[in-house]
Amino acid sequence: MSRTATVERTTKETDISVEINLDGTGVVDVDTGVPFFDHMLDAFGRHGLFDLRVRARGDVEVDAHHTVEDVGIVLGQAIARALGDKRGIARFGSQLLPMDEALVLAACDISGRGQLHYAVDVPLCLLGMFDTSLAKEFLIALAANAGVTLHVRQLAGENAHHLVEASFKACGRALRQACELDARVGDALPSTKGAL
Ligand SMILES: [Mn+2]
């Protein structure tokens, strides 16, 4: 059974479609109109080994905020949908990810309770048209809509590009582990409650 999903969402601010295959090989095709964000989604998919296609058109003449946040919403929904009944998943994943001087930890639990705990002190600046505060906005939307408890924490680093990119890569790797089907879990739900 393939763990894929396609989700589309249109509002007055954005028009977004996301296709994901959780069991992919990291083939990514992204165009959001925000080049640095494309670079981050590429890193997320490639290191998460998700096949990911994203098309987004948003009101970037205002700024990139709506586009980035709404892609987080739709990507989160697509991950939740592709996970299906969550039987057989590893559930937890974590990755400590270095990028030059930056070192970022991401840890996730496919808990059904979407929440972000973010402790990355990124200098507030523009990376192209992406302002660095948008990294947190994206991850809030992703965690909430995927139903994932997500901790992202900086252990070292100062360069904004490195810190944001390390965060996206770490999240991709951590989610890859958590989404992975574990043969020893079999067809069970990895929960003492019997629900995720
Ligand atoms: Mn880069």
Image (tube, rainbow, N blue to C red):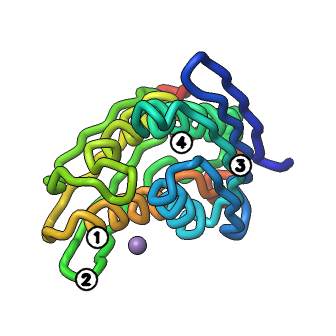
Distance in Å between CA atoms under marks 3 and 2: 29 Å
Direction from residue 11 to residue 82 in the image, left or right: right
Reading the chain from its start, which is encountered first: label 4 or label 3? Answer: 3
- Give the numbered dot on residue 20: 3
Name which quarter of the figure residue 103 lies in.
Answer: bottom left
Report which residue position mark 1 lands on.
162
Residue 78 horizontal/vertical position (percent): 66, 37
Tell me which residue sits at (76%, 37%) in the image: 6
Q: Nearer the viewer, residue 108 or 191?
A: 108
Q: CA distance from mark 2 to mark 1?
A: 7 Å
Q: Residues within 10 Å of mark 4 (few under 14, many from 20)?
A: many
What amino acid is found at the position of numbered circle 1 in the picture?
A: His
Of the two numbered discs 2 and 1 on the same chain, state the one appearing first in sequence.
2
84 and 101: which is toward the camera: 101
Q: From the viewer's perspective, is residue 23 above or below residue 159?
A: above
Q: Secondary structure at mark 3?
A: strand
Instruction: State the SS at label 2.
Output: loop
Q: Sequence order check: which comes first, mark 3 or mark 2? A: 3
The quadrant of the rendered image in which ligand 1 is seen is bottom left
Tell whether circle 1 marks a residue whose Cβ is less than 8 angstroms from ligand 1.
yes
Q: Which residue is mark 2?
A: 100
Instruction: Check disc 4 and report the residue beneath it.
Output: 190
Mark found first going from the N terminus, 3 or 1: 3
Amino acid type, callout 2? Asp
Is 180 rendered above or below residue 192? Answer: below
- Residue at image coords 33%, 57%: 106
Q: CA distance from mark 4 to mark 3?
A: 23 Å
Q: Is residue 83 above or below residue 11?
A: below
Q: Position of residue 169 (x, y in %)?
A: 43, 65
